Amino acid sequence: MKRFRLIVIAGLISLTACVSTIQPMSKQQSDTLRQGTTAIAFFDKSGKINYVEDVYRVLAITQNGSSSSYKGVWDSNSMITDAHVKGFRGYGVNAKSAFKFLKKNDLAILKADKQRIFTGAHAAEGVTHKLSDKVRKALLKNKIENLILFDWHGFTLHIKTLGLDAQEKFHFNFKIFNVPSGKMLFQGYSNSMETVDLGKQSGKAYLERKGLANLKADIKRMINNRYTVSKGSIGHVIGLKASK
């Protein structure tokens, strides 16, 4: 049986080792987010599983690294976007996946905008971002008032030594935009880390067998936890509470 455990530090659930220090959105902004229709999009720039394995030496612990690509095997963009849509709906946000209504050409324009916004100097915290007119036009045509873009550097499985459980982890950056103005309302980030008992399996066998079944299930579970934990949730960072 698989066994999962949240990382707990000082009595607090620390699925997120650190969360954004940016002030939460104002009540007016959060109310606006709940009242309008919000599109969510995640584009996977990594497309691979990162494996890090500790190796015990007499005087130190060293690490070996490798990776395994899932491009062309798994549509991570749609699944991970859907997981975030579910999380925001739990906060009372009328959220929908951009992959469910945008045409292929419009998705390509949105992906290019996302790459611009999350790359280089544009990615620095505190920088004011703005959506391109092409993206705004495509979203407004579909009656979208808000847009949330997600980015990450990929999924990592850290295989420990000395009998310690392996750790699954990833880091999300996200930015929230008002579509009519194109202006950014909020930016933040959230780290997720959980332990998993691999038993006698290798990390690769555990995550990649049966069409990446465990990878997909674990990522969905970990994202869901980021929205539902009592401390350090994405809603807590933004200033949103679960709807009743």
Image (spheres, helix red, strand yellow):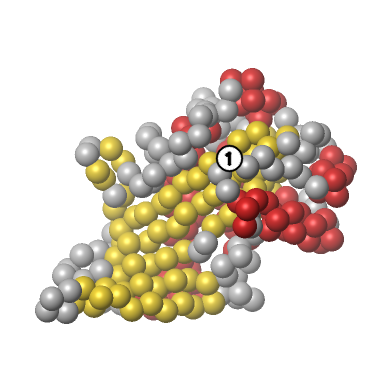
Residue that label 1 marks: 126
User: Is 215 placed left or right of 64 in the picture?
Assistant: right
Q: Position of residue 54 (x, y in %)?
A: 26, 73
Residue 159 appears anywhere in the view: yes
**How many residues crowd around disc 1 within 10 Å: few (fewer than 14), some, or many (20 or more)?**
few
Relative depth, front residue between 149 and 214: 149
Number of marks in the rendered image: 1
Q: Position of residue 145 (x, y in %)?
A: 76, 34
Residue visible at 37% across and 35% down in the picture:
231
Q: Quadrant of residue 34?
A: top right
Residue visible at 65% across and 33% down in the picture:
185
Relative depth, front residue between 194 and 92: 194
Q: Position of residue 32 (x, y in %)?
A: 68, 25
Q: Quadrant of residue 95?
A: top right
Which amino acid does the dot numbered 1 rest on? Gly
Residue visible at 58% across and 54% down in the picture:
151
Q: Quadrant of residue 193?
A: bottom left
Residue visible at 29% across and 53% down in the picture:
5
Q: For the N terminus, which image quadrant?
A: bottom left
